[in-house]
Image (cartoon, rainbow, N blue to C red):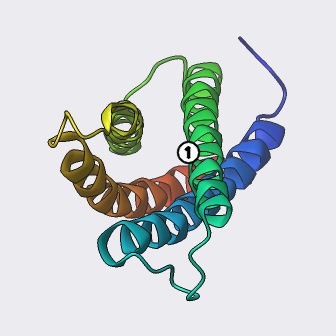
Amino acid sequence: MHLPSFLWLWKIAAWSMGFSILAYVLLALTGVWLFQVRTTGRSPIGVVLPQVNNGVRSLHYKFGIAMISLVLLLLAIGIVGTLGHFGSLGHSSHLIAGLIVVALVLVSAFSATQISLGKPWARPLHISLNIVLFAGFAWVSLTGWTVVQKYLP
């Protein structure tokens, strides 16, 4: 694949990464909200209404779906862009960082679907993966910055 410029692709990737991090932050906020309601019976703003908490849970799921979609879009952009520009993959540690982040996001999403009273392992796994995902996002951001430098004129 020989295209004149991949700059348009990297712009999409930059926006996608920014929105992925925003989704992660919003997931953390809504997750803390849900955790506090579950453990103390009170929400962070002092209002405990079932419809408010169900709305927060719904937002948490929607942000999660958005983050999964964005991370998979980033994976596709990385593969297409790297193959198109270099002809092969594996030119930096960014590939490993990206694959680890994709795996963390997908396993976290799977564990979220398993959270229930009969599966006590799911919630701690989900929370632990998301804490590790913070480091993963930092690593993929740092390695991505070095990759971007290769493509800038």
Considering depth in this image, is 87 or 93 the residue closer to the camera? 93
114 shown above or below 47: above
Residue kind at label 1, given as amino acid type: Gly
Give coordinates of residue 143: x percent, y percent. Answer: 42, 55
Total count of labels: 1
Give the structural element (helix, strand or loop) at label 1.
Answer: helix
The answer, for residue 121, to whether it is visible in the render is yes
Q: Residue at x 35, y 40 (%)?
A: 108
Q: Residue at x 19, y 35 (%)?
A: 119
Give coordinates of residue 24: x percent, y percent. Answer: 52, 59
The answer, for residue 152, to whether it is visible in the render is no
The residue wearing badge 1 is 64
Considering depth in this image, is 72 or 61 the residue closer to the camera? 61
Residue at the limit of the structure toward the left, as seen here: 121
User: Within 10 angstroms of label 1, few (less than 14), some, or many (20 or more) residues?
Assistant: many
Give coordinates of residue 142: x percent, y percent. Answer: 43, 63
Considering depth in this image, is 100 or 123 the residue closer to the camera? 123
Give coordinates of residue 91: x percent, y percent. Answer: 40, 35
81 shown above or below 125: above
Instruction: Please identify the quarter of the rendering in which residue 25 is found.
Output: bottom right
Say whether residue 109 is left or right of residue 85.
left
Say whether residue 69 is left or right of residue 92.
right
99 shown above or below 28: above
Point out the image quarter for the N terminus: top right
Instruction: Please identify the quarter of the rendering in which residue 22 is found.
Output: bottom right
Residue at the limit of the structure toward the top, as seen here: 1
Q: Residue at x 33, y 78 (%)?
A: 40
Point out the image quarter for the C terminus: bottom right
Q: Residue at x 38, y 43 (%)?
A: 101
